[in-house]
Structure formats: C-alpha cells, structure tokens
Amino acid sequence: MLRALARALRLDPHATAYLISLVHPAPLVAPARATTAASVGVQLLLDHGLRVPAFAVDLGLNILAINATGRALYSGFDDTDNLARMVFLDPAAQSFYPNWHHVATQTVGNLRWGLTAFPGDDRITEVVDELSAQSSVFTELWATHHVRPRTGEDKLFHHPQLGELRLHFEALELADAPDQRLFVYCALDGGPFPDAVALLETLTESSVSL
C-alpha cells in the first residue's frame, strides 16, 4: 500500500524509502557504538593518497578527517567541524556557495536520508536540534521532509582568496563504516575553467612555507 501511495505521489526511490521507514523503521545497520573518527586507512588515504579536496563525514555531517586541500577549500570558514553548521550558521557560506539555497536544500535532504537508514541516530538528531534552534531557514526546509543523499554533481564555489572554483563532487561509501562516507572533489577536465585543485594546492604550499 505504501509503495502504491508513493507511485501515486510520484516519489523518487529515496523519498519512497523514507516514507516506508516512517511506518516500518529498518533495523539499525550502523555499528553498536557510533564511530567518532575516521579509520587509520581512511586517514592515510586522505593524507597521502589524495591530492584533491576530500574528507570523511558521519551521519550528522560531522567532519571526522580532512586533507590539506580540503582545508584549503574551506579556509574561509571559522570552523570545519560540521558541514551542516557551516552551511546554515557560518556567515561565510552565503558568499562561498553562489547557489546557497540549493546547497541548503541538499544538506537537509542528506540529513533526513540518514534517518531513513539509521532511525533516531543521535548524531543526526543533535545537529537537527541545534540548527532548528538557530536557523529559521533550516526549520522551514526540514519541515518539507525533503530526502535525498548526496551523490555526485558539478559544484561551483566562490573562494575568498582564489575566486570562482568549479569542481566535481562524489560521495563514496566506506565498506567497513556504513555510518561514514568519503566526500571527494575533483578538478573538471578541459573546458575554460582553471584547474581548481592546482589553485588550492598553492594555498597549502603557502601555509607550509610560513
């Protein structure tokens, strides 16, 4: 019956899964104890295996580990501890994301997607409660029940030092940590756009030389 209702409402697969989870919550597949850090292997990958901006996040979009070019990408923010707080509470977000409302909607959809697979996870509810108390825009978007995980797309940023940066985003699942994902930003091949990763690397080189 729920699937028939979803078809009638023309819901996509993510929204359909969320609708079903409201009535029949899925059993938790996250570890019995929530992880609070990236694994040693992921940390090695970030530090030595990826020159592109990359970082590991948990279900509440807490940033568990980030590499040097990732820090350079978000250098205009006061803190880089939680993506949702950065989007909704840091003043830098409005200029950093030219299409801020789209990013805000994505962030809300991603948090709600986490509740589909991991109902009642404290890491999600904590950030939702915090943002609901401090951001009216978040409260309005959360009330829409938009649900969609972040997957892949081309992104535009306005960096405070480097100007316009265009990167391709991918979210990768971690086999040994179902409650974590790796967010990776790659340079776009060809076209009129400068190599955004190379530009970010100049900032990391500058910080090392200081």
Image (cartoon, rainbow, N blue to C red):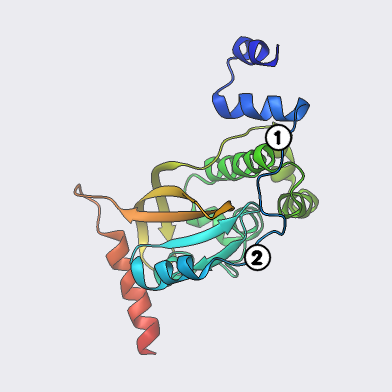
Residue that numbered label 2 is attached to: 36
**In front of the other: 20 or 76:** 20
Secondary structure type for disc 1: loop
Q: Percent from the top left, x then y, of residue 119?
A: 73, 41
Q: Quadrant of residue 46?
A: bottom left
Residue at 46% in and 67% down: 41
Residue mark closest to the camera, 2 vs 1: 1
**Which amino acid type is shown beneath numbered disc 1?**
Ala
Towards the viewer: 113 or 159: 113
Residue in the image at 32% along x and 71% along y = 201
Residue labelled with disc 1: 26
Where residue 197 sits, quadrant-wise, is bottom left
Residue 47: which disc?
Answer: none
Q: Work out whether 14 lies above or below 138.
A: above
Q: Please, is residue 74 above or below residue 119 in the view? A: below
Amino acid type of disc 2? Thr
Decide: few, some or many residues near mark 2? Use Cα within 10 Å; few <14, some 14-19, many ≥20.
Answer: few
Q: Name the N-terminal-most of marks 2 and 1.
A: 1
Determine whether the residue tagged by mark 2 lies in a helix, strand or loop.
loop
Looking at the rendering, in which quadrant would you find the N terminus?
top right
> Which one is nearer the viewer's eye here, 45 or 202?
45
The x, y position of residue 171, in whole percent, is 46, 48
The C terminus lies in quadrant? bottom left
Tell me if 128 is positioned left or right of 30 in this view.
right
